[in-house]
Amino acid sequence: MARIIDTEVKNMIGKKVKQYRKAMKMSQQELSDKLEVLAIYICRGSISRIEDQTRTVTDIELWGLAQILKVPINIFFE
């Protein structure tokens, strides 16, 4: 079943993902590759869409992003 979110902004964390990824000097592709090691498959293009807030994020993806970016999950919501 398709997820339907009737807003332009589809996540609350994209800007923080980009901020912490860049702070680690990591490319979107490198982030995608590191997530794959955790069996979380988000392609580089989807990382871009997460960061520009045009793609939703699942709880498992959120957990993986926090693990790779070495931040607690709640930091994405501050």
Image (cartoon, rainbow, N blue to C red):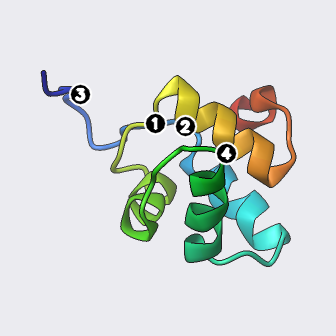
According to the picture, the residue beneath numbered tag 4 turns out to be 65
Residue 5's label in the rendered image is: 3
Q: Of helix, strand and loop, which one carries label 3?
A: loop
Residue 77 lies, in percent from the top left, at 70, 30
Tell us which disc is closer to us: 3 or 1. 1
In the picture of the structure, the residue carrying the numbered disc 1 is: 57
Please tell me whether residue 55 is drawn above or below residue 2 in the rendered image: below
- Mark 3 to mark 1: distance in Å? 12 Å
| Whole-number angstrom distance, CA of label 4 to CA of label 1 | 10 Å
Q: Which residue is mark 2?
A: 61
For the residues bearing labels 4 and 1, Cβ distance under 8 angstroms: yes
Kindly report the distance in space between the C-alpha atoms of the residues bearing marks 4 and 2.
6 Å
> Image height check: is 15 above or below 11?
below
Residue drawn at point x = 61 percent, y = 35 percent: 62
- Disc 1 residue type? Val
Q: Nearer the viewer, residue 69 or 50?
A: 69
Q: Position of residue 37 (x, y in %)?
A: 65, 54
* Amino acid type, callout 3: Ile
Query: Is residue 60 shown left or right of residue 1?
Result: right
Identify the disc placed on residue 29: none
Foreground tag (3 vs 2): 2
The answer to whether the residue labelled 2 contacts the one labelled 1, judged by CB atoms less than 8 Å apart, is yes
Q: Earlier in the sequence, mark 3 or mark 2?
A: 3
Q: Position of residue 22 (x, y in %)?
A: 74, 72
**Looking at the image, which residue is at 76% across and 30% down?**
73
